[in-house]
Image (tube, rainbow, N blue to C red):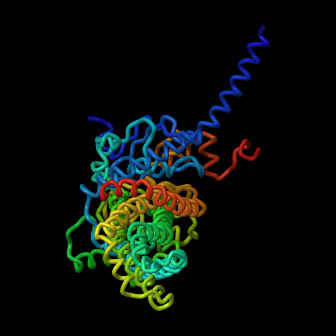
């Protein structure tokens, strides 16, 4: 049996530079189906770029991005658009449309892609909002919400089309420890109840260890190491240990 | 010998550097025009093939058109009034004040109404389009649209370009109407030019094609001005500073394009309606 058949996303030999800065330099990674994969790495290592490459928001200079065996980069613009319906994405600052209220934000994907009547849309939106623990906020504008609430609304919106794969770009960065925990639980619950494939970009070690089925560490444009949380904890590689324990390298200080 | 070669190479590299720095603005400009052309083609493609967002179209028609009506009417009124004042002071020298109406009429219909309206729309709607799309780009809202399988050109650009293009001729008409009214009031009531000859000359000189020329210009300016604003907004980076820069560029590029394009359009229209 093909060992990669359980992989939903396969990335092969990705290379990407912005000007003279190499962000991906021969990167290979597989995302297993139905699991939570956490991509860790230092700030500015290109984790968000990697996540956006998966969904075709950023295109690599070379390499392949296979979504269930189809190369995203060989599809037409329309084909890529169709492919993106398999995905849901939660952006770093939630990226809610600030010209619409919370209800319209969450209803947006349905209004674009389904032919449901308004009352059916309302039922679905309120249901999704309840799932992320929000009630009576539909009429509020995104600017009236706290950071944690925005992320919940963003998550409700990302889940609206019942995606197979959901991408989280630093879901807990900038939140207090209690909110972080509640978002973590929300991700875990979402994973359990919808059975989807999750990819999380994070540099929050505690959350990572708690949630991950698989961890992949990005280092200088490649995957330095991938495996279970246990294998990471037991790793002898000083670069991994420094990251897990939050120690700065000597050359970083100098 | 070696020294001579080294010297030559050094001079050559200086030469190369000089040529590069001279050429850079040109290649930059060509790249910019190229990417604008591609952006335009993509917009045309999504206009014919994409989903039609009626709600967004109407919202933008209100924002760009309806909400500009008052300011356009005000500017039109005063442009007509001041133009009447100036022409009258000139024509008075040769006792031809009754020609004020027809002169102002032709100038308004063919040039002033479309150009001034376009400049007002650049300032009012172009800047806000560039700032809005620019902010959406830097706050990942454009990426969010894409991630939900909604193409931003289809959802953001096509309705705005269409709305501006549809509203421009209407606004040009309003400008024109108020301009004529302003000129009439100043001429008849303030300067006491006899109404009979004023109106007679006006009706004799003015032809429907004068208004038609203005409306054609309005449509062309509407397309180009909104495309520039959307393009600048769409290609924003570097956060708040970038949004500021895109907005400024949208207004500057839009106004300059209107004024330059107007000359060539006029050349063409004068051949079309001799």
State how many labels appear: 0
Q: Does residue A38 lie above or below A176 as drawn? A: above
Image location (x, y in percent) of residue B103:
43, 73
Is residue B53 shown to the viewer in this render?
yes
Left or right of residue A104: residue B115: right
Q: From the image, which quarter does the N terminus of chain B lie in?
A: top right
Of the pair A250 and B21, the residue shown nearer to us: B21
Residue A227 appears at what percent x and percent y? Answer: 46, 44
Q: Quadrant of the C terminus of chain B?
A: bottom left
Asked if residue B21 lies left or right of residue A18, the reply is: right
Residue at 73% in and 18% down: B8
Identify whether B242 is placed above or below B61.
above
**Of B147 and B246, the residue lying toward us:** B246
- Place of residue A32 in the rendered image (x, y in percent of width and height, measured from the top left): 36, 47
Query: In the depicted view, which residue is nearer to us: B80 or A63?
Result: B80
Q: Is residue B19 above or below residue B25?
A: above
In the image, what residue occupies the spot 38% across and 46% down?
Answer: A31
Residue in the image at 45% along x and 72% along y:
A98
Residue B17 point in image, percent of width and height: 67, 31
């Amino acid at each position: 049996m093909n060992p990669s058949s359980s992989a939903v996303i396969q990335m092969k030999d990705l290379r990407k530079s912005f000007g003279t800065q190499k962000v991906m330099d021969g990167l290979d990674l597989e995302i297993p189906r139905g699991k939570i994969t956490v991509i860790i790495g230092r700030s500015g290592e290109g984790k968000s770029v990697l996540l956006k490459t998966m969904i075709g928001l950023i295109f690599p200079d070379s390499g392949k991005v296979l979504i269930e065996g189809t190369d995203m980069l060989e599809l037409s613009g329309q084909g890529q658009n169709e492919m993106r319906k398999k995905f849901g994405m939660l952006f770093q600052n939630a990226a809610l449309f600030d010209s619409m209220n919370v209800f319209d934000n969450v209803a947006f994907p349905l209004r674009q892609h389904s032919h449901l009547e308004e009352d059916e849309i309302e039922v679905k939106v309120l249901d999704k909002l309840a799932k992320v623990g929000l009630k009576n906020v539909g009429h509020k504008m995104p600017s009236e919400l706290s950071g944690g609430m925005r992320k919940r609304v963003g998550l409700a919106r990302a889940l609206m089309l019942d995606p197979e794969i959901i991408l989280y770009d630093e879901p807990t960065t900038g939140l207090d420890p209690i909110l972080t925990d509640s978002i973590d639980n929300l991700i875990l619950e979402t994973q359990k109840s919808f059975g989807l494939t999750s990819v999380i970009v994070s540099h929050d070690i505690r959350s990572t260890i708690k949630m991950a089925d698989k961890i992949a560490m990005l280092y200088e444009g490649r995957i330095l190491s991938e495996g279970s949380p246990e294998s990471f904890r037991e790793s002898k590689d000083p670069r991994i240990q420094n990251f897990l324990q939050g120690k700065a390298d000597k050359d970083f200080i100098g | 010998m070696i020294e001579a070669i080294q010297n030559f190479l050094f001079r050559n590299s200086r030469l190369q550097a000089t040529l590069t720095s001279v050429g850079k603005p040109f290649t930059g400009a060509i790249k910019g025009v190229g990417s604008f052309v591609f952006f335009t083609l993509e917009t045309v493609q999504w206009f014919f093939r994409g989903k039609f967002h009626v709600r967004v179209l109407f919202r933008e028609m209100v924002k760009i058109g309806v909400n500009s009506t008052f300011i356009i009417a005000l500017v039109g009124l005063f442009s007509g009034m001041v133009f009447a004042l100036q022409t009258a002071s000139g024509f008075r020298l040769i006792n031809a004040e009754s020609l004020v109406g027809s002169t102002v009429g032709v100038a308004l219909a063919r040039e002033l109404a479309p150009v001034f309206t376009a400049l007002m729309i650049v300032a009012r709607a172009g800047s806000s389009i560039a700032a809005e799309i620019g902010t959406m780009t830097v706050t990942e809202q454009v990426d969010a649209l894409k991630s939900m399988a909604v193409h931003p050109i289809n959802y953001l650009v096509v309705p705005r370009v269409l709305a501006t293009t549809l509203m421009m001729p209407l606004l040009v008409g309003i400008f024109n109407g108020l301009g004529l009214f302003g000129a009439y009031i100043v001429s008849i009531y303030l300067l006491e030019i006899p109404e009979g000859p004023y109106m007679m000359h006006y009706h004799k000189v003015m032809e429907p094609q004068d208004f038609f020329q203005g409306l054609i210009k309005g449509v062309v300016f509407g397309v180009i001005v909104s495309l520039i604003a959307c393009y600048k907004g769409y290609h924003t980076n570097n956060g708040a500073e970038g949004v500021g820069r895109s907005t400024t560029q949208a207004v500057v590029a839009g106004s300059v394009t209107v004024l330059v394009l107007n000359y060539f359009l006029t050349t063409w229209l004068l051949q079309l309606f001799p």
